[in-house]
Each structure stands twice: as structure tokens, then as C-alpha cells.
Image (spheres, rainbow, N blue to C red):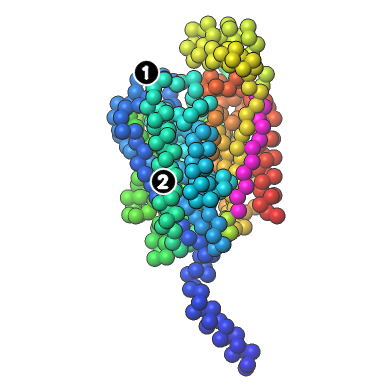
Amino acid sequence: MKRRALFLAGWILCAAVCPVGAQESGGWKAAAASAKITPKEPMWMAGYASRTGPSEGVTQDLFAKVLVLEDGQGGRFVTLTMDLIGIPSSLRSSVVEALRKQHQLPPERVFMNCSHTHCGPEFRVGKSLYLEVMDHGDNRSAEYGAWLAGELARITGEAIQRLAPVKLSATHARCGFAMNRRLPTRLGYKNSPYPDGPVDQAVPVLEVQGADGKLLAVMFGYACHNTTLSFQQFCGDYAGYAQEYLEAAHPGAVALFVMGCGGDQNPYPRGKLELAQQHGRALANAVEAALTVTQKQLVLGPVKAAMGTVVLPFAPPPSKAELEKLAASTNRWEAAHASMQLKKLEVEGKLASSYNYPVQVVKLGSDFTLVALGGEVVVDYALRLKQELPKKSTVWVAGYSNDVMGYIPSRRVLEEGGYEAGGAMLYTAHPGPWKPEVEELIISKVHELDRQLAE
């Protein structure tokens, strides 16, 4: 009887000191914030080489959003998402340094992802290798980049000041408008719908509920280019509409879109505003299904994060004589790219042989793993990693993260050839395609970081 009385007394004391909600939630705190980042004046737009002039208005505003998580031990993790074409490494460096100084956040605790909308501005933050060949010499590009870096740091600080108890849950659904775009033909791989090609139509969801049970934020992903639209107006494309619809359905909540490994995936059908809205509605409906229908996994702490770089080798570049010949090409992008490489040879005496590629792995407790890969990663990486990583309730693989420097093909895609394999390098400052071993180098680094966090 005495032992039972002591047990009951201890249980009552624990209940009085530790609210049930705090025990069930794992001690998480969180806050989210957003800022409109639509350019205030016309700017050149990123995504299509065929554009011949600056933007001509706004169909939908662009946003930057932040979700700050804090575990029961005070460990923090920051997610920043943007309705933009890419993340220059210089932008990440600026933001990470500001957050380190202002909030003592280490770099591995900051995750940045862009939606890759092709209806956003072309911008620079210092020197940028991505879309370098498309630089139109407009000062507004650099001014916008500097302002953007400040906004990202500002909204992060705003969210940190409002951290409050929450419950985290992971769930998922599916959405069907993404389709592989690498159609095999007798003349090679064509950028066209290929319904028999590999695809990842999963919609991973991280739900953040406030102490009152209301949705405070929802982070969701999808692996598909934001290329429904190609007009001359700013717009978030399907990802922008999905976020808009979710926030309208949940007043006060912040919806954050995370782009997956959609480097070789397009939304179909495409080409009209109403199609972008339809795809956005389909994706928002998938998220709603995940929130209300599918089974959820409670996410506990603590936060663990690791980040590293992989030296990715380029294939041997063209000779100087070959570059001189290409510089005289009637294809203006081929000529511009070759001229850029010749200038590098003249100034630096050699061309780049490799690139320092970022890989990030984040764990929330033992049941949630986020893998963040730089560049325009093709779907093979997500499909492979979700099979190879230790089986978890959630393995979320994001591309377009932390640094978008060009396409990241798998060995299969490199061997097949085509746009994602090397053709798109014309629009970057890189000398040419990657070597075939890049896939194994990246995958090995992911496994290394995952094991490091499991120790």
C-alpha cells in the first residue's frame, strides 16, 4: 500500500508540474513568419532563355517564409523557403552569417529551399555561378539580392521572438500532375512528357499545431518543376497557388512549399494560368488529405543536424581551340558560354575542375529524416535514398536546397544524355557536364552524415 501511495503521489506531482500537452508534444516550440518578396519594379525574369525583356506586372505575389523549431533542450532548426528560381551560394552565405551573429545559429541548423518558379526575378548576391551567362547587367538584380538577404534574416529573427509550445506530426499523401519529361526518341532524349519515366509523386507533410490545437504552420513538398507558366508576370506557379489556398483555408497559418528532386519532372498539362491554379488546388487538396485523412506520426525531438560538402568533378572541358570555334557559333547561348570560358582561361589560366557541393541531413527525433541536396536534382536520388536510408516513419528528400548551381543528374541520366545531363550547363558558368561518379559521391555523403547523426 505504501509503495502504491508513493507512486500515486509521484504521478500527481508530475501531472501538476508537467502539463500533459507538453509531455505529448516532446517539448517543441515553434513559430512561423512570411514576407512578400515581389520586386517593387520591373526586373528581368529567370527561367527561360527566350525572354527578351523585363517583367510586365504581377499575377501573384512572391513570398519568403520561415519556420523555426526549438526542441526541449533549446536546440533550434530554421527552414527558409522562397518563391524564386534558385539559391545562389552567396545568398546562403550572407543569411547564414547574419543568423550566426544575431542568433548563434550554426550553418547546419539552417535549411534553405526555393520553389524554382520560372516566373520570378533574376537576381544576384555578389558573384553567382548560376544563370551567370544570362546576366543582363541590371543593377536592380544585385540590389534585390542584398535586400532579400536582409529580409530572410529579419523574418527569422521575428519568428524566434515568438516561439511558443507546439505539437509536430509527420504525414504524407500523393498528387498526380508531375510527369517525367525525358522522352526517349531515336534522336536522343527530348524534353517532352514521358508517362513511363520515373517519378516521385509523394507529398510529404510536417504539421505544426499550436497549443490551442489550431494549425500554426504546414511544411509540404513535391518533386516537380514550377514551369506551368512562361509569361512575363511574376507568379509563384502551382506552388504559389497551393500555398495561397492552404493559407486561405487555415487563417493565421503559414504554408511553406519545399521543392523535391524534380529536376527531370514537369507539371502536365501546362501553359495556362488556370492550369497552374488547378495544379495548385490538386496539391493543396493532397496536403489537406494528409492533414485530415491519412495516419500521422508524432514527431519527437531532439533536433540533430549535419552538413558537409562533396567535391564533384567536371568532365574534361573543351580545348581552347574548341572553345574558340564554339564562341563563333550562331547559337547565342553556346557562343556566350564559350566566350565566358575563354575569358576564364585568359584571366585564371585554367577552367574549373570541380565544384564544392552541399549536402545536409537533419533528424527530428528518431522518426523523421530530412535530406537536403543542392542543385536541380533529378528524381533518381529521392527514389534511391528513400530505399537505402534506414527505414523511418518519414524520409524526406529535397532538392534545390542551400545552393542551386545547375542540374545534378544521376549516372543513368548522364549516360542517356540530353538537357539535364549537360545541355543546361550552357546557362551556367560551369565548363561543362559532370563526371559519371557524381551520383555515388553524393549518395555516399548522405549515408555518412546519416550515420554521424545516428551515433
Instruction: Answer whether residue 373 is visible to the viewer in this image.
Output: yes
Q: Write down the residue under mark 1.
A: 52
Q: Where residue 145 sits: x, y (%)?
A: 42, 33
* Residue 13 located left or right of residue 144: right
In the rendered image, the residue lying farthest to the front is 101
Q: Which mark is residue 418?
A: none
Q: Is residue 191 above or below residue 283?
A: above
Where residue 275 appears, as percent x and y from the top left, is 36, 35
Mark identifier at residue 154: 2
Q: Residue at x 56, y 86 (%)?
A: 9
Q: Residue at x 51, y 27 (%)?
A: 128
Report helix, strand or loop for mark 1: loop
Who is closer to the viewer here, 339 or 247?
339
Residue drawn 64% across the image and 41% down it: 308
- In the rendered image, which quarter contains the N terminus? bottom right
Secondary structure mostly taken by the magenta-highlighted segment of the chain: strand
Q: Residues within 10 Å of mark 2 (few under 14, many from 20)?
A: some
Does the magenta segment cover residue 308?
A: yes
Spatial CA distance of label 2 from label 1 is 34 Å
Q: Start and end of the magenta stretch?
A: 304-314
| Mark 2 vs mark 1: in front | 2
Q: Position of residue 62 (x, y in %)?
A: 36, 38
Mark 2 residue type = Arg
| Front residue of 364 and 91 | 91
Inspect the magenta stretch and tell me whether residue 325 lies in it: no
Q: Which part of the image, by quadrant, shows the C terminus?
A: bottom right
Residue 260 spot, x, y in % from top left: 52, 40
* Mark 1 closeness class: few <14, some 14–19, many ≥20 residues within 10 Å: few
User: Is there any visible trace of residue 202 in the rendered image?
Assistant: no
Indicate the quadrant where residue 403 lies.
top right
